[in-house]
Image: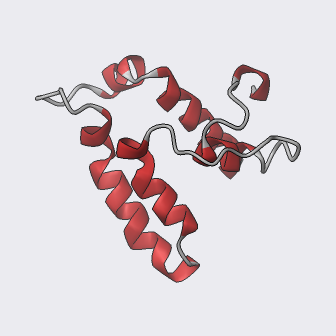
Amino acid sequence: MLALIVNDGEDVLLDRIIVSRSPDRKIGTVLLYPKPYGRLLKAVDAPADSQAPLLKAFVEHWYQASNPDQTRRRSAIGILIGIPMATRTLKAGLILAVGV
């Protein structure tokens, strides 16, 4: 699966997630999608005792930040089909990071 996730060294959040499974991966310095994922990076960077509320804020704001032009909610399947490739890639990275 890691072979499908390209862009080594381009996105700090994605690279930091993937490096747990691929230690030789170059870690970027820029967050490519700051609007939807800035809160997640802030949660990851925070001390452990501060992460829960920051992660909750990320989850509460992610959909709107990822889809600012959407005026109505889509079904779960529509979300999975309609999300940008970068988002699907990040989800794959998150799955790898937590070992699901």
Give the quadrant of the N terminus. top right
Image side of residue 84 versus residue 70, left or right: right
Give the quadrant of the C terminus. top right
The residue most toward the bottom is 49
Q: Position of residue 60 (x, y in %)?
A: 28, 54
Image side of residue 21 versus residue 67, left or right: right
Height in image: 35 above or below 53?
Answer: above
The residue most toward the front is 29
Image side of residue 86 versus residue 61, left or right: right
Q: Residue at x 55, y 36 (%)?
A: 91
Q: Residue at x 71, y 38 (%)?
A: 9
In the rendered image, which quarter is residue 72 located in? top left
Height in image: 87 above or below 27?
Answer: above
Height in image: 75 above or below 58?
Answer: above
Q: Residue at x 56, y 67 (%)?
A: 45
Image side of residue 18 versus residue 87, left or right: right
Depth check: give the residue in front, 40 or 98. Answer: 40
Depth check: give the residue in front, 4 or 13. Answer: 13
Depth check: give the residue in front, 27 or 75. Answer: 27
Q: Residue at x 68, y 27 (%)?
A: 7
Depth check: give the residue in front, 79 or 29. Answer: 29
The residue most toward the right is 24
The residue most toward the left is 71
Q: Position of residue 95 (x, y in %)?
A: 63, 41
Q: Position of residue 44 (x, y in %)?
A: 55, 63
Number of numbered tags placed on the structure image: 0
In the rendered image, which quarter is residue 79 located in? top left
Render colour scheme? secondary structure
Q: Position of residue 27 (x, y in %)?
A: 73, 46
